Image (tube, grey):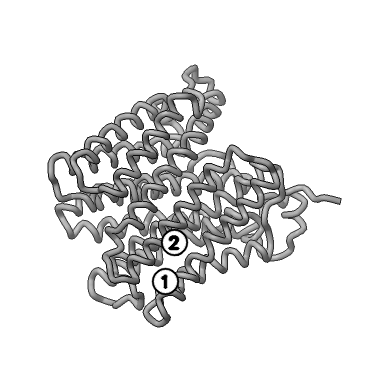
Amino acid sequence: MAQSSAEQMRAWQGPAVFSFGFRPFFLGGAAWVSIAMVLWLAALTGLISLPTRFDPVSWHAHEFLFGYLGAVLAGFLLTAVPNWTGRLPMVGWRLAALFGLWVAGRIAVLFSAAVPPAVAAAVDLAFPLALGLLILREIVAGRNWHNLIVLALLAVFTLANAVFHMEAMVGDYAAQGYGLRLGLATGVMMIAVIGGRIIPSFTRNWLARTAKTARPAPPMQRFDKAVLLVSLVILLLWVMQPVAWLTGWALIVLGLLHLVRLARWQGQHTGAEPLVWVLHLAYAFIPLGALVLGLVQVTGGAATAAAQHIWMTGAIGAMTLAVMTRATLGHTGQALTANRGTVVIYLCLFGAVAARFAAGTIPDLNHVAGILWLAAFGGFVLVYGPLLLRPRPEGRG
């Protein structure tokens, strides 16, 4: 007899962390991005020399974008796809093996100086390829065709990782290469697509529950689809021509379109619940990053790296943290409301974004940004780790 998702998870007798996809990957991703920040700060101050073939800045960029974000994507997709397709989730030792593949990638990249370059790249790319094949199988088996866009974005993200490795192999500065920009642009598109579904939905549910009359515009209407199509074109232009007058003005248009999109979701009415307003603030980093990047190009400024971090630290960092906190609470049977520890985590992350941007003119603030980043993601491990490591009372999640 076929088991339900809940029955399958209750049947798992091993560690609770492998009873659902979000558990190992949210916890592992947050722990790794904290460890990686400690290593980066130590390398930045000259205390250690990283045993990687990448230059330190490229390793730092790679492990945040492809290492950390790759883990969060896996946790999100392995939790969401069963809901999309109606099929059973991956649990138990198969999930542990997939997580082990991600861990192997982190080790291979960190110690890549000790192995042939192609070996580290192959081990690192094995994880997203395996994840993509798994998601493809589930979408095809469940005939859930409208979510192929998410799989397509994952495929481009994997391609970007491969390009990053290739650039590093030939001695290019991969932190400013095509792979980094393609991966970052894909991350922004993922937030635009997935955030465009969940933010108005969660906002509507909260507004209805609190008897407020305001309602967000329904997700994925014609305006949203038009914004996503225009965003795809402009982001591809930025990937190919990052320093150009035309690209600058296109990015400004992108920023204005996403500001209008965000305003339609009624975030100004959600101030009483951090789990909701953090989603709106995290999404706001997409238009903010586009506007700043655009202005840098139009005015001939030199703060491109600082501006890019509005997308990297801000949009990706804040949105993933927002999704991880909310999903962990919901899937472990907790009330969907943020406690003080969660609010502190959010505030530390926003402080890290501000400090990293300001570090473009005051380099010493890089250390402040790193410490605040550690407080945010180390705080997630401390506050949410116990929930991720212990079973839900009724055996679900």
Q: Which residue is mark 2?
A: 67
For marks 1 and 2, give the CA distance. Answer: 9 Å
The secondary element bearing badge 1 is classed as: helix
Would you place residue 201 above or below residue 341 in this image? Answer: above
Helix, strand or loop status at disc 2: helix
Q: Residue furthest bottom?
A: 114
Above or below, 276 against 265 in this view is below
Percent x, y of residue 210: 53, 24
Q: Position of residue 287 (x, y in %)?
A: 32, 36
In this view, which residue lies farthest toward the right?
Answer: 1
Looking at the image, how many numbered discs can be counted on the residues? 2
Q: Amino acid at mark 2?
A: Gly
**Between residues 219 and 326, which one lies in front from this camera angle?**
219
> On the image, which quarter does residue 19 sit in?
bottom right
106 vs 74, left or right, is: left
Q: Is residue 374 visible?
A: yes
Query: x, y percentage for residue 8?
Result: 75, 54
Left/right placement of residue 73 relative to residue 249 reads right
* Neighbourhood count class around disc 1 (C-alpha, 10 Å): few under 14, some 14–19, many 20 upward: many
Going from the N terminus, do you reach mark 1 or mark 2 first?
Answer: 2
Q: Amino acid at mark 1?
A: Val
Q: Is residue 48 placed above or below 297 in the rendered structure?
A: below
Q: Crowdedness of circle 2 by 10 Å Cα count: few (<14), some, many (20+)?
A: many
Q: Residue at x 57, y 64 (%)?
A: 99
- Report if the CB atoms under discs 1 and 2 are less than 8 Å apart: yes
- Disc 1: which residue: 109
